[in-house]
Amino acid sequence: MSAIIFLCGLICGVVFHRAFAVIKGATLDIQMFRIAELYCLRMLTLCLEDGVFIKEAKYRAMRVSPSMDENQVKIAKNEDSYLLGQWKEDAIKKMIAVYPPHYRRIIKYSDWKGAMGWLNLNMNKILDNDL
């Protein structure tokens, strides 16, 4: 009788240990995904900042050019503003599209504004290793 109780206890122990290991592994997996996600979002913001910097240099060059008037600069700014807005939305949509299917359900945003809110909310956590 005590051998049966010992065997049941051993089996239960193995099952609980395995279940705990799976849950812990899944938790670490999601944390690593979140960290990679935040770094990808940060890289997108840096790309955007570089793009804006390049556009500003273009506007300065256009202003000092004798063949360009202020209306042409304004038109270029409007076009660039529209294109950057499109780029931001496309970048997030493409990023989400390449996520593995089992991670898509945990994404907390669907557009640039939501992604930047998510990044701002969680960047301090990643810097403090508290994600």
Image: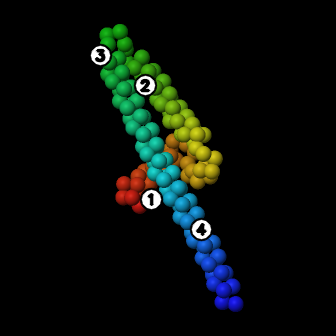
Up/down of 16 relative to 100, above or below: below
Q: Are marks 4 and 1 in contact (CB under 8 Å)?
A: no
Task: Of the two numbered discs 4 and 3 on the same chain, state the one appearing first in sequence.
Answer: 4
The image shows residue 127 at horizontal and vertical percentages of: 36, 54
Disc on res. 18? 4
Q: For mark 2, what is the residue? A: 77
Residue at mark 4 to residue at mark 3: CA–CA distance: 70 Å
Distance (Cα) linking label 4 and label 1: 24 Å
- The numbered mark at residue 131 is 1
41 to the left or right of 109: left
- Where residue 11 appears, as percent x and y from the top left, is 65, 76
**For the residues carrying marks 1 and 3, which lies nearer the camera in this image?**
1
Does dot 4 land on a helix, a strand or a loop?
Answer: helix
Q: Disc 2 vs disc 4: which is toward the camera?
A: 4
User: Which residue was labeled with disc 3?
Assistant: 64
> Residue 33: x, y in percent?
51, 51
Spatial distance from mark 1 to mark 3, Cα to Cα? 49 Å
Does 71 sit above or below residue 7? above
Direction left: furthest residue:
64
**Image disc number at residue 44:** none
Q: Is residue 45 above or below residue 82?
A: below
**What is the residue that sits farthest to the bottom in this orientation?**
1
| Amino acid at circle 3 | Val
